[in-house]
Amino acid sequence: MYLDLDRRKEYQLEKAIRKEKNTQPENQTVYSILFIIGICHLLNDSLQAVIPAMFPILEKSLGLTFTQLGLITFTLNMVSSVMQPVIGMYTDKKPMPYALPIGLSCSMIGMLGLALAPNFWMILVSVLFIGFGSAIFHPEGSRVAYLAAGNRRGLAQSIYQVGGNSGQALAPIITALVLVPLGQFGAIWFTLIAGLAVFFLSYIAKWYAVQIKEFTRSKASRKSNKTSKNMSKAIKGALIVLVFIVFARSWYAAAISNFYAFYAIDSYGITIAKSQIYIFTFLAMGAVGTFLGGPLADRFGKRNIILFSLVGTAPLALLLPYVGPISAIVLLAVIGIILMSSFSVTVVYAQELIPGKIGTMSGLIVGLAFGMGAIGSVALGSLIDLLGLTPTMIAISLLPLLGFLTYMLPTDEKVSQWYA
């Protein structure tokens, strides 16, 4: 009997030691996991960004029309954005640690199909695979960042999101080096990038499987704290305001990314090559802003950074259409840093607004940003056809003023009190 008792105690001690090794305290930040998931985000988004960069090559190799190219873009953006909150909702209820490598495996199949596709319809099927893989990756990747964050959620989300922004910025350079000399078949080299991501994500999935068990137990212990009707209304109201803020940021960013090059060519009389400097400056500084936003939010508060990102951008955006070519580059650099400083912060704010729905909130906010950007590009293109470049650029400079809606969001302290 005593021997059995001793064995039981020894077993419990060993179990406690194993648990200590496999899980970290809630306030401890696991930087190794954050950097790996950030690198995987870079790899994933570089695959997604290769598709529009391939358009000139696909147009020549398969004789595609601009309508068909537009349909490819629409398919990619809609699948990758609309599916994100759906997948997030499902995995919030039934966590799937190995969904991450499965998602990138889908993207790898899509890239292989893109390299070998003989016609438009096979291109579309390949894009569906890539979009679906991206839709799986984003909410689950954000959940990994949340679990590894400890008490540095802003920093953790910034490390994760800056990987994606960097992937989008690097893809055109990689494409120029690979696809231009090799043509459509050159896309097959990007399957190696996808394979590398699958390898890294298989490692993360093992860590994730252990952590999600602890998180699920912790979430279950807090379930008894039911929200009141008034609080539920306040949360829904805050979420609606947050959606409008994401809308303003996404549409303005889409306008600069997609149409400012045309504006620079028209206004400053520069070449197409030189006009790309303006876009690269905005995107590169946007990646810097994404990284800085998280730590600043940890220090000064998430709502304050969301407010600053749009309201701080507003006067610069209003000034941009009236300055010369050199001043425009400087303004775009500063606008990129300030505007995109809230990219990761809005995700963390939404996750804390509705705890326990990490994947849903990440899918909603990030998916909404991509979806709004896609819709915004179509709407702004139509507006340019109707009004012209200069009037449209002046009109969109008003969008950051919607940042004043941030005053309607509850403060960080208020949100914390709701779930205390």
Image (cartoon, rainbow, N blue to C red):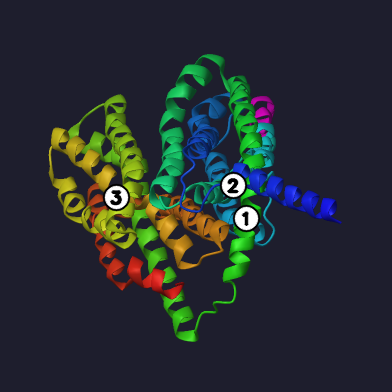
The percent coordinates of residue 21 (x first, y second) are 61, 41
Mark 2: which secondary structure?
loop
Q: CA distance from mark 3 to mark 2?
A: 27 Å
Q: First in sequence, mark 1 or 3: give its number.
A: 1
On residue 38, which mark appears? none
For marks 1 and 3, give the one nearer the viewer: 1
At horizontal 82% and vertical 54% (from top left) the residue drawn is 2
Residue designated by label 1: 214
Residue designated by label 3: 296
- Say few, some or many: other residues with alpha carbon within 10 Å of mark 2 (under 14 / 14 to 19 / 20 or more): some
Q: In this image, 16 relative to 234: left or right?
A: right
Q: Tell me whether circle 1 and circle 2 mark residues in contact (CB < 8 Å).
A: yes
Q: CA distance from mark 1 to mark 2?
A: 8 Å
Position above or below: 206 against 190:
below
The percent coordinates of residue 286 (x first, y second) are 32, 41
- Say few, some or many: other residues with alpha carbon within 10 Å of mark 3 (under 14 / 14 to 19 / 20 or more): some
At horizontal 63% and vertical 53% (from top left) the residue drawn is 212
The percent coordinates of residue 369 (x first, y second) are 44, 53
**Residue type, label 1:** Glu
At horizontal 60% and vertical 32% (from top left) the residue drawn is 200
Residue at the outermost right position: 1
Instruction: Please state, as top left, top right, bottom left or bottom right, where the C terminus lies in the image.
Output: bottom left
Q: First in sequence, mark 3 or 2: give its number.
A: 2
Residue designated by label 2: 23
Residue at the outermost bottom position: 229
Q: In this picture, which residue range is highlighted in magenta?
A: 110-120
* Viewer-closest of 10 and 237: 10
